[in-house]
Amino acid sequence: MVVKGEESDKILELFLKIGLDERTARNTIANNKVTANLTAVIHEAALANGCDRAIGNFLYTVATKYPANALVHRPKLLEYVVSSKIKTPAQLEAAFSFLSNVASEEFKRNEFEEACGVVYFSNSFHNLPANLVGELFGSIRKKHPWADPKMAKQLVDAKMYELLGERTAADDEKPSKKKEKKEKPAKVEKAVVDETPAQPSEEELNPFSIFPAPEDNIKVHTEVFFSNGSVLRCCNTRERLDNHLKVTGARVFTRFPPEPNGYLHIGHAKAMFVDFGLAKERGGCCYLRYDDTNPEAEKKEYINHIEEIVQWMGWEPFKITYTSDYFPELYELAVELIRRGHAYVDHQTPEEIKEYREKKMNSPWRDRPIAESLKLFDDMKRGLIEEGKATLRMKQDMQSDNFNMYDLIAYRIKASMYLIDVQLMMSLFFDILFLYFQFTPHPHAGDKWCIYPSYDYAHCIVDSLENITHSLCTLEFETRRASYYWLLHVLDLYQPYVWEYSRLNVTNTVMSKRKLNYIVTNKYVDGWDDPRLMTLAGLRRRGVTSTAINSFVRGIGITRSDCSMIRLDRLEYHIREELNKTAPRVLVVLHPLKVVITNLESGSVLDLDAKKWPDARTDDTSAFYKVPFSNVVYIERSDFRMKDSKDYYGLAPGKSALLRYAFPIKCTDVILADDKETVLEIRAEYDASKKSKPKGVLHWVAEPSPGSDPLKIEVRLFDKLFNSENPAELDNWLTDLNPNSKVVVPTAYAVPSLGKAAVGDTFQFERLGYFTVDKDSTAEKLVFNRTVTLKDTYTEEVKAMEFNSLDDAQSFYLSCAHIIGFGVRLGGTKTNPKTWDVIAKYLYRNKEGEWSDNHNNNNKRIREPKNITRTGCEAKMRVKNLMKSFREASLGANVEALAMRRATIQPS
């Protein structure tokens, strides 16, 4: 509610009387919260007729900083302020700290005065020995932070006079500043680089450190401002909190509360990380609670999926519960809400409710008698009122600035009505029409209920009933916090600590369950577990591991920045990091081109060793697998060109290339189709001695025996589902679907050992990417899904950025390094321009697209920042490591999460 007209003028006059300047007073009036607080403070202090400016400033500080959990003691503090017993900012801050700890408990005057420096402290100095005079003032400030500095200075001067007598001219002489000769350090041949890594902050090591302990949940987290000017400061009483702590043993209790109306997506992975992760880190418990208050949208299929996917993600619920388990308690509390005058039965249609809310108008039934609402609510429960004809609404504040206080719906009817014609025989010979209501079946509760609580009513109450300590949700629920606390307050229930964090938004996809449900039901994708979707089932089917997903989520961090869109290639980076360590290598050719080796006898087959892992030890037989090599092999069609070029390392007429794990081959002839363009077959000779050393290395697959084709597999190449980074903001978002998001290669060739693969097994197809066996595989044919390509666009993005000038490139590097928290200390004192050449190589390309040696090309000295020194080869290596970590940290990250990745570079 904004203060207007005469009321505004009166408040302005009141604020001016206490010494506020007009600008501050007007700015204060623009803030409803501060206006209400300051007005209350002035009247509590009995200073409506004015006071001097110093006291007025203290009143303003009390109005803006006073701990809300100790409001009962505010008048006592104001007594000390008005009487000038508290007269310094330090004393006032000490008072706030003391009262915050006391909260609503008994106010002990002696302890308060001692903590705030009300007791005169000059006696503290009488017995100080002379040898402490030099540190006297500092000691006073430490011991009495609330002390008046001028008074402290006077007492220090008096004590020094007592000990030392009058000040002499010698006391005023300044010590001479003679420069001591410094020994020249011995010449060091090579600068040593300090490799000590910067120490990460506590929040980087533990993202859950931002959350308070359960025993601290006695402070006000939310103030609800009503249109009549009153303020509701919601907090637990000491007695209520103590009862809660007895039940929980002071442990952390959280809950992961998905609605079972669809499959979980990657956004839920972040919610799981926050809810289960906090409980695990604090040694507490996390419920898996199904928020099942909408029976029409919920299915048993979704319930089963959620439980299974939570376990796959690596989380173990303390207990699995349902909101519907609490339907009896929720109903009784709704009855109590009506009895207390905080709810009423309403008969407005949804359209009328919307219209009245927009106009901030009360429902015509808002002030109906309590007994009448109790009777109607009972009729609703018994199925005597048709669906849509009545709702139970909470009586909140229809004129509030928060639309989530506009008398939210607590209960609605979910039942179907049927008209049944029953002919009574016997003595009655007429038709009677009966109205019959069939309760909407619920996947967990069955057909016991025909009224269902809303999210806004049930969520906070079940949190309280389950003794949740930390109720964590995404930022779109922040405006519901007022309703959350209001309802628990009017029902006298325990109030959990509520905290909102930013939701996870990933590019090139949609995260809305409504949109996901639409493209699934309308067959734009192949079900909820389509590998192109960001559902957790889809990601798992694609071959993404839960470890990679959790690593991705942890790297993002727990922040309240709600404007970030996380790049898809950042997720892909974490997937590669994981699969690179776990996926064995195999040889597969997607688009085979036949190569006949003319100098190898037809029918002969050599068994060669191929590595499953790039760093395989030669004495570890388990790290190798056998691949057949015969006179007919197949290479990728893209690895052959009719015209060679300098920067091409594939096969061409007259050119050699190495077959990985095998031999070099040289193209001697090409067989073309009738169109004289399409290549049908290549003739080549192999170098059995391996003396030739071609630069190009090709993957390949050979015929395992004469005349028989290699193992045939189907490969599905998945790409981004949408072309735009944020399709959800488009009006015609369906037109943005990527037509090439799924490409099927029906007949790829693979080495024989791949035939033993089982569903879910993941491999790296060398030079192609990471692939996993799909559930559509049969005994006759394996089907593989591409999980992710080998190319890492995430860490290469900065490398590919073009800048108009070297200065732009350097500015970009420095600003990003500053955001991440990097400093560079490379040692040495000489200026070495080669260092900036390394930076430029990573950040700057000229107009021709070539990497530029800017120092040489520009033929001018490049200035270095004053806080950076560098030297020779060590500098190059340090900057290279810095840029690698910088690329990993910066792309797709929000600023608050950048520091999660640090280089081994000390701040300068």
Image (tube, rainbow, N blue to C red):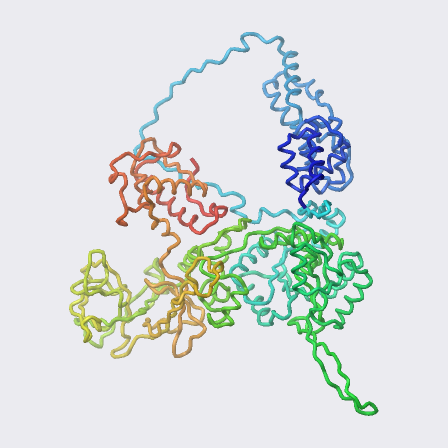
Out of 538 and 598, give the one closest to the viewer.
Answer: 538
Q: Is residue 677 above or below residue 135?
A: below
Quadrant housing residue 57 = top right
Q: Residue at x 77, y 84 (%)?
A: 432
Looking at the rendered structure, the number of numbered marks drawn on it comes to 0
Which residue occupies the foreground of this view, 214 or 705?
214
- Quadrant, the C terminus: top left
In the displayed structure, does residue 321 sit left or right of residue 636?
right
In the image, farthest residue toward the right: 427
Give the percent coordinates (x, y) of residue 84. Answer: 73, 26
* Residue positioned 71% across, 23% down in the render: 121
Residue 252 at least partly seen: no
| Image height of 690 relative to 24, above or below | below
Residue 448 lies, with reference to residue 357, above or below; the image says below
For this rendering, which residue is in front, 533 or 878?
533
Q: Residue 414, image x and y in percent?
A: 68, 70
**In-image side of 153 versus 743 (left or right):** right
666 shown above or below 486: below
Residue that sits furthest to the bottom in the current view: 426
Quarter where residue 37 is shown: top right
Instruction: Tell me residue 226's x, y (percent).
Output: 71, 48
Residue 528 seen in render: yes
The extreme front residue here reads 5
Task: Residue at 43% x, 48% y: name it.
Answer: 890
Quarter holding residue 231: top right
- The spot of residue 657 in percent (x, y) is 22, 62
